Structure formats: C-alpha cells, structure tokens
Amino acid sequence: MSTSNFFNTVKRVFPINPSSKSDERLAKLIAKTLINSTSKPLQIDPSLTSNLNPNIIHLVLSNPNVKIPSCLHFFRFLKSNPYPFSQKPNLQAHITLVCRLFQARKFAEAKIILNQVVSNENLVCPTSDIVSMMIESYEEPKIVHKLFDMLFRVYADNKRFEECLEIFEYMKSNGFEIDDRSCMVYLLAVKRCDQLDLLYDFFRRMVDSGVKITVYSMTLVIDGLCKIGEVGKARNLLDEMVDRGIEPNDYTYNTLIDAYMKKLDSGGVKEMLNAMEKNGIPYNVATYTLLINWNSRSEEMEEAERLFEEMNQRGILGDVHVYTTMISWNCKLGNTKKAFRLFDEMAERGLVPNCHTYAALVNGLCKAGHMEGVEVLLHEMQTKGYNLNRVIFNTLIDGYCKRGMIDEAWRCQSIMEQKGFEADVFAYSTIAHGLCKLNRHEEAKRLLLSMVDRGVAPNIVVFTTLIDIYCKQGDFVEAKRTIREMESKGEKPNVVTYNALIDGYCKKSMMKEAHKTMREMEVKGLVADVYTYTSLVHGECISGNIDEAARLFSEMPDKRLVPNIITYSVMISGLSKVGRSDEAFKLYDQMKEAGLTPDDKVYAALVGSLHPATT
DNA sequence: TTAGGGTTAG
C-alpha cells in the first residue's frame, strides 16, 4: 500500500461532529482570551468554560493564532479544571497538542504529552485511533513518520509491547523507514522487563523489514537467547549476521563465551576464543573475568592467577568485577589472606568495592570460621552505606550452620525477616542442611516441608536434601516418591540426587538396589562420579564383597574418575577389616603418591589391619 | 546502546 492510499483509508476519528456556529464562536472567544492573557494562573471567564465540549477544545488548540505557551496553559488549565462542569482534555485534545508541539519542534514536550496519552487509563484506545488522529492533524508524511517513531518509543517506554508491534507494522506497511535506534529502545525495554522471549521475534521483524542491524541490537538479542537457554539459536543468529556483514565485537563474543561456559560446553568456548583471535579482537577485562571463573571452577587457581597476571601485564585495567571474582575464588578455596590482599589492592587502585565484593569476603570469613571478623566486616560495610542484603544474610546463616550454631542461624533469619527479606529457598535449605549435620533429620525435614507450605518453591537442592534425609531414615519408598514428585514439577534429578539414593542403599547393604539405581541414572544420561563410586565401594565393603569393591575401585580410572581421600579411606578400611593388610598398605602408598594426605581414619584402619583379632 | 562479579545439597 502506498503512503497516500494508506492516508485515504484511515477512518476519520475526529472531529466527531462538524463544528457548529456556536462552537466556533466560543472557540474564538477563548482563543482571544488566551492570546491576550498575561495572568498566571490562567483566568477564564466561567461563562466561557461552562459550555466547553471536545470540539471547542480542539478548535482552540489547533488555532495557529494561539501560540504554543498559551496552548499548554489552556491544556494544563483544563487538566486541573477547578469548575464543577469539568471538561478534561480528551484523546483528541492530547493528540492535537502533541502535533502542535511537534510542529514547533518542541519534541521533549510533545513526548511528555504523548506519554500521558499512553499511560492515562482514561485515554485508553486502539493504536489505530492515535495513528488516525496523527495523520489527520498532520498530512505531511515526513512529520507523521517522526510522530509514529515517537509513539513507538513512548509505547516501548511504557512496556506496551503489543502496541509497539502494531505501530511497527503500520510504519512498515506504509514504507516508513524504521529507525534502528528506536528498535534498540524497544529491545532494551523488553530486556529490562525480562520478557526475553519477545526479543528474537522482534529482531526477525527488524531483519525482514530492512531495519539497519547493529552490533548492539545483535548482541542484545544473542544475550537474550542465551539467557533463556537458546544458545544454539543464539549461535546460529551470530553466524547468520556475520554472513550479512555485521561484525561481532568483544561484547558479542563474551556473551556467547559466558553462555557456553554456563552449559559447560568447552568446545563452544574454544570456538569463540578462536574466533576472537581470528578477527583480531583482543580479550578485555570481561573476557578475563569469564576465563578466570572458568578455570577456578575446576579449582585450577594457578591458571586463574596466571590469567589475572597476564591481564595486568597487557595493561588491561582490572575492575570491580574481576577483583570480586578473584576475591570470591580465593575465599572459596580458603585463601582468605590472599583475598584480603586483593581487597587492599583494589582500594590502592582506586576501585570501590560493592555489595558483591563484601559478600564474597563475608563468605570467605564464614567458611574459615572467623565469625568475629565477619562482624567487623559487616560493620565496615554498613558504615560505607551498604545495607545487608539477602545474599549476605544467607551467607551468614550458612556460616553459623557450618559451625553447628543453629540458634545463631535462626537469629540471622529473624533479623533478615525484620529487615523485610522473607526467608528464601537458600535460607531454608541452608538451615536444613545445618540440622542434618547435627543429625536432627526430623527437624530438617519438617522445616523443608513447612517451606513448601509457606509458598516457597522447592528446587533441586531442597528435593535432594529431602531424599537424602528419607534415605538416612531408611524410608526408600518416600525417597523414590520424592524423585517422581520433583520430576513431575519439572525439576530434573541430577547426579547428586541419585547419589543420595545410591548412598542410602549402600549404607543399608542393599547393593542390588544401589546398582539398579546407578543404571537408571545412566539411562537418563547422567554420569556416575567419584561420589557414586565411593558409595558403591563402601557398600560392597560393608556387605562383605571386598573383591567387588576392589573391582569398582580399579574401574574408576577407566571412567576418568580420581579417587579422593574418602574413596581411599573406605577401600583401605575394607581391605584392612578382612586382613588384606598388604593390599591396604599398597593402596596407602598409592594414595600418598597421588598427593593425598592420609587422615586419622586411614591410620586407624591400617593399624587395625595389623591386628585383625582386635578389630 | 550490547558482555563479566556475591549465597544452598553428597
């Protein structure tokens, strides 16, 4: 449809009635009053305003002799009309004023009025009405085009995404070029509202309509797709856009690197890093942050340190993100001193720590059991104007739970709730875990079930903890029922969940069920890990099947599993108990060669193996 | 105008 055809087909929405002579006369009188008026606030003879109707208001506002300030004056006067027969400006009045403001190039004011149109409940109307009014007020297509563009942005600002699409389609079908920056306004608004599923569809419309695609819009949509788990689609989009000549930048690659890392897809990560190199895009501080996290995750802090050094040597300035990452990993791995050195270094470099940085340090001190240090840090944080937040409260609760101080943990929860943070799934599962550690399984179970009653949705950790409790209590029926329940709620059991069940069977010498559960788990694509094997080895040992235990133990390297201190301890103890002392000592040497430090249990088992009669 | 940082389970 050509532009002119479109204009002709628009239904006329105003004036509703042709102007009567009396309307015109009254409109002229008001206009005259406005033109001559110098008083503020505006004084209009009540005899003029008592008979107002929408048509008169329109005639006044569209009268070119009434200058813009007077129009605004009159408009505001009507909005706050003090008279009993109040005639508020209707949609037509708003649009007439918007068009006048546009004509006078007062774009900011026009946008404010248009915003009132879109956000005022009393002015709700189909987009087609606004469109029609704009066209009728302004026959010049160039101006109408700009008005549509502004309307599109105003709808986006007001989260009226459906209406945005309608305007987009109006513009497209009338050959109006659509501004890529306006599309960006839409994309950003959608993202801010977390309606990520809308991004891709809109981007496709942009592409189909010939809107200029920029690296910004492309990256934003790729990120949106990644965040809703559509990493493959995001990658395809990247490839498609590269073919169209859009050049990805460091933000684009970092977005995909992050997504692949979250999926544990190291192939994808490598591909993106290679692409960066091929395209001559150097790593920036965000890339280093991602790489440091990726390497620390597998406890390769040395590699993380090397990357941090490399970043500094390349002259890339560290920021609060990368420092917080380094601090956080050092805290998790127990290097609290190093974490505080980094914290000081940050300050020396003029970087200001934020809530995330403090939370990482609080976590470090909690994990190290330095609860007094935590108090000092919290005080410092608060004097700097940072309030304790939910994450920090949960971290504190965990800190106290890990030290068996359940009452202190309850106290934290109470303070947290006084501050307006309802306990969330983290708080509940942390306290439940603390109770489990103290063998208060029944209380932990009741707590988790009460959490559900209070409307907090259980997640995989909660279900797994419950399953673990049921198993420890020997209630395998309820444990299996819980697995079915979590599956029905869309929460997929993972290897930790199955390990809880397997360990439960093993501890009760129900080895047939244990192996059957492992097979079930593997059918679902989950891979047995060192915990699975340790439980099985333990189960076979206590069931008297030491050869089977030894077979499982020797199978681990084939599955790329490295026995840990517990695995060795269990196997050594099993061998010792049946008097196979030589093999036990051989394993002890093997364990030391593997860099593991034997603990008291290992020694006790070995000593016991030498005195089988006393064990 | 697009990316990266803090809390829970075996």
Image (spheres, coloured by chain):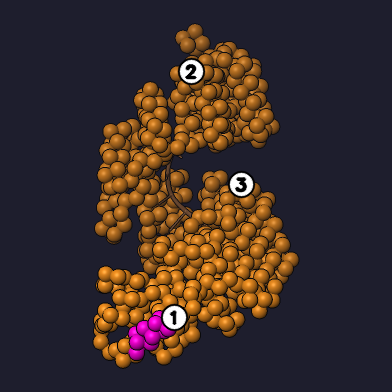
Chain colours: A orange, B brown
Q: Dot 3 lies on which element?
A: loop
- In x, y percent, where is residue A154? 48, 69
Q: Nearer the viewer, mark 1 or mark 3?
A: 1
Q: Residue furthest front?
A: A21
Q: Are marks 2 and 1 on the same chain?
A: yes
Q: Position of residue A454 (x, y in %)?
A: 37, 35
- Measuring from the top left, give residue A149's x and y in whole percent: 55, 74
Residue that numbered label 1 is attached to: A20
Q: Is residue A58 left or right of residue A574?
A: left
Looking at the image, do the residues carrying marks 1 and 3 touch, with CB atoms under 8 Å apart? no
The residues bearing labels 1 and 3 have C-alpha atoms spaced at a distance of 74 Å
Left or right of residue A461, residue A492 in this image:
right
Q: Is residue A265 magenta?
A: no
Report the front residue among A249 and A534: A249
The single residue placed furthest to the top in the displayed view is A613
| Residue on which the image places disc 3 | A264
Mark 2: few, some, or many residues within 10 Å (few <14, many ≥20)? some
Residue at (45, 24) in percent of width and height = A469
User: Magenta residues?
Assistant: A20-32
Of pointers 1 and 3, the one earlier in the residue sequence: 1
Q: Is residue A320 above or below residue A411?
A: below
Residue drawn at point x = 49 percent, y = 8 percent: A613
Between residues A206 and A435, which one lies in front from this camera angle? A206
Mark 3, residues whose alpha carbon is within 10 Å: few (<14), some, or many (≥20)? few
Give the residue number, with chain letter if any, for mark 2: A475
Number of residues whose C-alpha sits closer than 10 Å to that of mark 1, classed few (under 14), some (14–19) or many (20 or more)? few
* Tags 1 and 3 on a common chain: yes
In the displayed structure, would residue A103 be above or below residue A266?
Answer: below
Please state which of residues A276 and A573 is positioned toward the viewer in this rendering: A276
Asked if one can make out residue A261 in the rendered structure from this viewpoint, the answer is no
